[in-house]
Image: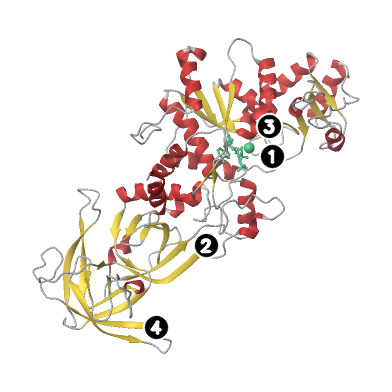
């Protein structure tokens, strides 16, 4: 795999790279770099996580460092090995590797417990018997200081005893918490004696029933970073206000000069979609999509099934850059990256999505002529395949018009068009049904007009794709549109984001016809249907029925926008 900068363009250093280069130059951490990607295994990864993965693993690649994959598995209620396995697979699929084993915050439960005991011993943590409501009521507001808990000044012995009994399962769930003793008047709410441990019975996917107390995210995260020797702990902006607590805790844990530093960047938000595991889970549970891997989902699973490539996703993530302020990225930028990559690697094939039969009347009934079609004009050695031209073929409905406007260069009564890799044909007649729908077109081919050695002297402006009626195979083609109708479905807190779902985001075509070479392709195979777009064979395919997903249409709306911006 190439390194994080898969483009050769000059890109200035982002602010995180500047920090890292400075640290490396100053010989901090012995000139080493260790980052981590810390997913919570409570859902499948989405495009926002892809950004974080590309950033963390990408920085390690760029600066000769390493990046750990560590699960932040501190909440047994919502976490599952199904998600663990899927996340590991997704990170690998994106093309990244970590040193050694996959890591888990739960690997550190004993050390975290010991650290908590130490904090109690030095008078910096206490067991609070107040209910969650009481604790939240007495926290104050950013401008009003909080009230100290009546349990705040318990003796070390009492705290040690109560905490051990919390661990031993003597108290009901949520009846007590361990809190850090920091400052109930701090302007930073996260420093007002934050909870470090809670009582929660639940079967943990790795530690089973060993624990009934679990560390809070803030208590587990920075300490796990420290245990692993993480140098730069990169996370999203919502954790900026947690940083003083992160620092407070690691400063009390560290024993030497090394300690990890947290750096925040803005989340990646993609327009016309949602990137929150909780919301994505709702779409799955309530049946708005077929699953986490529905090709309309912004999940890595969904994008993969849709036909997006890891290369395209990595290029996209690099292109959007790293910022301190959230900006919503238009999905057409992602589509642009996908299209650019597929243009280089995908075979060209012919398929007709809305077929009309064309009969070439001046050819004999059983006429067959085999020609060679180019697999990929972008690749020199992509080779050619045979396609067979016959008397009856299918073309796409939109390539014929009864009453065309002036600059319509496709087929219309009396007019000529070239069939790709074959002959020029001229429309002589057509049939319609009662509803006025065109059902069949009659043409004549122009002798000596064969593509490549045309000696007919006839000139035409348009070339269209076609499929032999005798040899074409039936295809199911799933056409996708954006999942949401508005750019930011999460903007309005008052309204349910599902109100903005696009109910036409899936349109299944059952009667498409593809060239015969498509018979032998497997799920994951990607090709360009000439003049239509890039498509990928879906996992629902079987030997009798090939199912294709629209990956991305050919029309390059982003390039037009970009061009406009450059002019
Ligand atoms: P969600 O909001 O979707 O539930 P999360 O932040 O709870 O996501 P985690 O599993 O905790 O999910 O995320 C793992 C890592 O991915 C974290 O470091 C988090 O900051 C990062 N991450 C999550 N969403 C985004 C995003 N939209 N853009 C960039 N990084 C993200
Ligand atoms: Mg999170």
Occupied quadrant, residue 414 = bottom left
Q: Disc 1 marks which residue?
A: 76
Q: Secondary structure at mark 2?
A: loop
Q: Earlier in the sequence, mark 2 or mark 1?
A: 1
Residue extending furthest bottom?
Answer: 434
Report x, y in % for residue 158.
87, 19
Q: Is residue 251 left or right of residue 487?
A: right
Q: Disc 2 marks which residue?
A: 505
Q: Secondary structure at mark 4?
A: loop
In the image, what residue occupies the spot 60% across and 45% down?
43
Cα gap from disc 1 to disc 4, whole angstroms: 59 Å
Classify 10 Å Cα crowding around label 3: few (below 14), some (14-19), many (20 and above): some
Q: Disc 4 marks which residue?
A: 437
Q: Disc 3 marks which residue?
A: 217
Task: Look at discs 3 and 4 and give the one toward the viewer.
Answer: 4
Cα gap from disc 2 to disc 4, whole angstroms: 26 Å
Q: Earlier in the sequence, mark 1 or mark 4?
A: 1
Q: Is residue 481 visible?
A: yes
């Amino acid at each position: 795999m190439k390194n994080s900068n898969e483009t050769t363009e000059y890109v200035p250093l982002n602010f995180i790279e500047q920090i890292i280069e400075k640290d490396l130059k100053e010989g901090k951490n012995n000139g080493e770099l260790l980052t981590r990607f810390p997913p919570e295994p409570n859902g499948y990864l989405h495009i926002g996580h892809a950004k974080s993965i590309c950033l963390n693993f990408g920085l390690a690649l760029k600066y000769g460092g390493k990046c750990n994959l560590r699960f932040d598995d501190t909440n047994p209620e919502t976490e599952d090995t199904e998600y663990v396995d899927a996340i590991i697979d997704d990170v690998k699929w994106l093309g990244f590797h970590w040193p050694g084993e996959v890591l888990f915050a739960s690997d550190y439960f004993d050390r975290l417990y010991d650290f908590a005991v130490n904090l109690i011993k030095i008078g910096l943590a206490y067991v609070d018997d107040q209910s969650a409501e009481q604790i939240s009521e007495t926290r104050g507001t950013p401008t009003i200081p909080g009230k100290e808990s009546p349990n705040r000044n318990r003796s070390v012995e009492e705290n040690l005893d109560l905490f051990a009994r919390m661990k031993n399962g003597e108290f009901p769930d949520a009846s007590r918490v361990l809190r850090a003793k920091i400052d109930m008047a701090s302007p930073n709410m996260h420093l007002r004696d934050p909870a470090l441990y809670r009582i929660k019975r639940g079967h943990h996917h790795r530690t089973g029933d060993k624990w009934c107390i679990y560390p809070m995210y803030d208590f587990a995260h920075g300490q796990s970073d420290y245990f692993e020797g993480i140098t730069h702990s990169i996370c999203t902006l919502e954790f900026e206000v947690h940083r003083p607590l992160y620092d407070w805790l690691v400063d009390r844990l560290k024993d030497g000069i090394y300690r990890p530093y947290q750096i925040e960047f803005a989340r990646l938000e993609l327009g016309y979609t949602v990137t929150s595991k909780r919301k994505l889970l709702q779409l799955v549970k309530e049946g708005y999509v077929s699953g986490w891997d529905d090709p309309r989902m912004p999940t890595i699973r969904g994008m993969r099934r849709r036909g997006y490539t890891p290369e395209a996703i990595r290029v996209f993530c690099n292109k959007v850059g790293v910022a301190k302020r959230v900006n919503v990225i238009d999905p057409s930028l992602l589509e642009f990256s996908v299209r650019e990559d597929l243009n280089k690697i995908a075979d060209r094939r012919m398929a007709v999505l809305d077929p009309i039969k064309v009969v070439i009347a001046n050819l004999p009934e059983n006429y067959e002529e085999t020609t060679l079609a180019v697999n990929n004009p972008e690749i020199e050695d992509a080779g050619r395949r045979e396609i067979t031209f016959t008397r009856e073929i299918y073309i796409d409905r939109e390539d014929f018009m009864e009453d065309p406007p002036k600059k319509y260069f496709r087929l219309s009564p009396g007019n000529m068009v070239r069939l790709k890799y074959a002959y020029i044909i001229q429309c002589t007649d057509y049939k319609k049904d009662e509803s006025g729908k065109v059902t069949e077109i009659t043409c004549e081919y122009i002798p000596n007009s064969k593509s490549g050695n045309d000696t007919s002297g006839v000139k035409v402006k348009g070339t269209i794709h076609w499929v032999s009626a005798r040899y074409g195979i039936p295809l199911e083609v799933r056409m996708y549109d954006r999942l949401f109708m508005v750019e930011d479905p999460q903007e309005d807190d008052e309204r349910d984001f599902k109100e903005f779902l696009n109910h036409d985001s899936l349109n299944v075509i059952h009667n498409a016809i593809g060239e015969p070479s498509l018979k032998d392709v497997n799920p994951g195979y990607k090709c360009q249907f000439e003049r239509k777009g890039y498509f990928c064979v879906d996992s629902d395919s079987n030997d009798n029925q090939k199912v294709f997903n629209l990956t991305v249409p050919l029309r390059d709306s982003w390039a037009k926008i970009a061009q406009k911006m450059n002019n």
